[in-house]
Amino acid sequence: MSRSLVAGIAYVAVVFALAFLLGIVRVTVTAPRIGELAATLLEVPIVLAASWVACGWAVRRFAVPGDLASRLTMGGVAFGLLMVAEFAVSALLSGRGLTAYLGAFHEPAKLIGLGAQLLFGLMPLLRH
């Protein structure tokens, strides 16, 4: 199980770093020009492709077994840490509390982002 935990941490670190940089570009450059929804739709495939690659790397690097429990652990750890990191960045940059953060998920762009985050969490199973 510890391989799955460490792999999940490494996986989220790599993908979150890239997604954070892309998020800066989305918020400051892309969204003001084409809108939040279109900018999100452009960003999501890039992040998911990077997730696919990073997940494969983490699975190989940390020799995560192919059984359901190991892969769910890796994905669950990564997804949980991603959600905590997303909220922390949101709180620090916009001053939004947890209620406001969760309330924003009714917006189409946020729902698409959440769907991509769920796929990110399931990626270790999909890579099997």
Image (cartoon, rainbow, N blue to C red):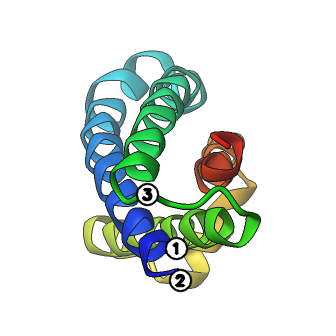
- Work out whether mark 2 precedes mark 1 in sequence or the reverse, and give the earlier one: 1
- Work out whether 23 lies above or below 42: below
Q: Which mark is residue 98?
A: 2
Q: Earlier in the sequence, mark 1 or mark 3?
A: 3
Q: Amino acid at mark 1?
A: Val
Residue depicted at 50% across the width and 60% down the height: 64
**Residue where numbered disc 1 is placed:** 77
Tell me, yes or no, if residue 75 can be seen here: yes
**Quadrant occupied by the C terminus:** top right
Left or right: residue 115 versus residue 42 is: right
**CA–CA distance in space, label 2 to label 3:** 36 Å
Q: Which mark is residue 114?
A: none
Which three-letter amino acid code belongs to the residue tagged 2? Leu
Viewer-side residue, 83 vs 41: 83
Where does the image place residue 1, in percent across and percent down from the top left? 53, 80
Quadrant of the image occupied by residue 105? bottom right
